Image (cartoon, rainbow, N blue to C red):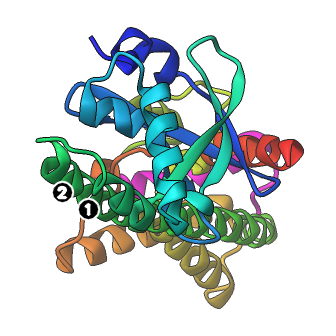
Amino acid sequence: MAFLNRYAKDIRNFKSLYFHGAIYNGTSKLFESQYIRSVWNPDEEQWYYSVIDVIAALTDSSDPRNYWKVLKSRLKKEGNETVTNCNRLKLQAADGKMRLTDVANTEELLRIIQSVPSPKAEPFKLWLAQTGADHLLDLADAKKLQEEIDTRIRARDDVREHNKSLAKAAQDAGVSTNQEFARFQNSGYMGLYDGETAAAIKRRKGLKKSEDILDNMGSEELGANLFRITQAEAKLRRENIQSKEEANKAHFEVGYTVRKAIESLGGTMPEDLPTPDKSIKQIEHERKNQLKKK
């Protein structure tokens, strides 16, 4: 069994590496039965691969480090610029320690492979191309996810802000105690969510009593609630409603009207929209921790 197979577990768990003084998260990619340590350089927008790992994958050598040492010496004597300009990164070795290792980007690696007689050379070239394509797709997916998260956070903040205005309008209409405000809010939810109260929505989403419903909505669901809230405030003020009973009725009617509008447009009912895997509170907590690490 080749070198990397003997230490596959350790290689899969390697944490990070250093590149020109910067730290980038590393990963291990599987080519056939071999793990190849690699890192994405965001500044250059390209992958760098451990040359020794690639040698192990192509040759099944029992000592890929020595194989590369001999090959590297020969290529240097031939004046090969790829070897002369070879970068070195600190990668986690099989013993768990960070050690300097020769790495090469895709273009450099293709030149090195030309000097390695192996029936796996062509399949490896295809693997390299696919790896690059997959990462571009991953970047696109990550960007899309980030945009959705940012939209969620903005929508949640907008809902919270407009809820304050709605609460003031409800207070002006005669809603005063905490219990009355809870009933008023539930009226809007029941109209929009086909009879569900705030507590019922939390149960359906699997939330604890202490968790915020808004933090556990996607951008589409938050948008529906924002429309409900702004229109409820406008109705209370426009019609100069002056009783808590009429305020509750108005809030329910607005919620129901928003629901019927979604239905007429062929949209998904709010109770059928998926609950995001992570709450906004969790996301914000993770972002704070990431900033602390920088």
Q: Position of residue 125 (x, y in %)?
A: 22, 56
Left or right, 49 with reference to 185: left
Q: Position of residue 148 (x, y in %)?
A: 49, 65
Q: Are marks 2 and 1 in contact (CB under 8 Å)?
A: yes
Compared to residue 25, the image places residue 92 above or below, namely above
Q: Residue at x 57, y 74 (%)?
A: 232
Q: Which residue is mark 1?
A: 129
What is the span of residues highlighted in magenta in the rendered image? 174-193
Q: Is residue 29 magenta?
A: no
Crowd class of label 1 (few under 14; some 14 to 19; many from 20; radius 10 Å): few
Occupied quadrant, residue 62: top left
Q: Residue at x 24, y 62 (%)?
A: 268
Residue farthest toward the bottom in the current orientation of the protein: 238
The kind of secondary structure the magenta stretch mainly shows is helix
Left or right, 258 with reference to 58: right
Q: Nearer the viewer, residue 58 or 247?
A: 58
Q: Is residue 187 visible?
A: no
Q: Nearer the viewer, residue 56 or 200?
A: 56
Task: Give SS at disc 1.
Answer: helix
Cα–Cα gap, marks 2 and 1: 5 Å
Q: Which mark is residue 93?
A: none
Compared to residue 18, the image places residue 40 above or below, namely below
Compared to residue 21, the image places residue 133 above or below, namely below
Quadrant placement of the N terminus: top left
Q: Which residue is mark 2?
A: 126
